[in-house]
Image: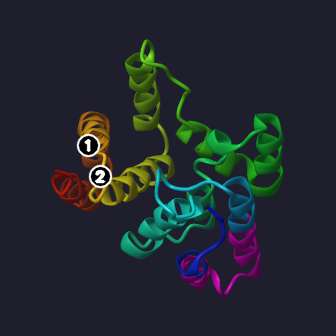
Amino acid sequence: MEWNLNNFTKLAFTRLIQPFGDDLNDVVKVTKAFSYAANVYSGLFRNESHEPYINHAMKVALILSDELNVHDVDTICAAILHEAIEKSKNDDEIIEFLKANFGENVYDTIKILTEPRTNEENREKLLNKYFENISKSPKMSRFIKLADRLDNARFLKNDIKKEKALRYKEETQKYILPLAEKTDDTMALKLSIALYEIK
């Protein structure tokens, strides 16, 4: 299956830089995040679909920008790159790049959002700790995690693997809905609707 940027990817990028049109430095920063994400996520697809994985990152950033009116450049860059460490083949190289090009604030956010590698034995323990850390993290990190889960829930609504979708729904209800209720009422409502639609 050939991987390339599709029309959605290009349109999403255009929409994301619009709010920053008056500040060239911000446009450059978002462009750099997009370019690096396209490189890190290159060749990856979303589940078994033909959708390039970068579209998920772009949708997370668009949820923040379009649906919640979040126009902080660091938040948008962190949203685009929120799974860069997880998907990277070289942790040290990407960590160095993120710090040098986006600063400690963006790097710290991505680090908080990076899910631990788990197996069946330690999954629940590690996830409890992971979500507990996110619940104590700055609002920027929580917003990105909520947008990530919201996009995934919307995507899974049409997933043919119902068992996987229902497991994701259950995990989101357990860990993420309480976080959404603590963070933002609008996000909690959007997430509740998306989860309801997974059947």
Examine the structure image and report whether residue 180 is included in the region drawn in magenta. Answer: no
Q: Name which residue lies at 59% across and 45% down.
A: 109
Mark number, residue 169: 1
Residue 57: percent from left, percent from top:
54, 60
When asked about the image quadrant of residue 12, the answer is: bottom right
- Front in this rendered view, residue 98 or 116: 116
**Number of other residues with Cα within 10 Å of mark 2, as a class: few under 14, some 14 to 19, many 20 or more:** few
Main secondary structure along the magenta-highlighted residues: helix
Callout 2: SS: loop
Residue 17: percent from left, percent from top:
62, 80
In the image: residue 15, left or right of residue 148: right
Residue extent of the magenta highlight:
11-32
Residue extending farthest to the top is 121
> Which residue type does callout 1 highlight?
Lys
When asked about the image quadrant of residue 101, the answer is: bottom right
> Which residue type does callout 2 highlight?
Ile
When asked about the image quadrant of residue 93, the answer is: top right
Disc 2 target residue:
160
Q: Can you say whether 95 is above or below 57 in the image?
A: above
Callout 1: SS: helix
**Number of other residues with Cα within 10 Å of mark 1, as a class: few under 14, some 14 to 19, many 20 or more:** many
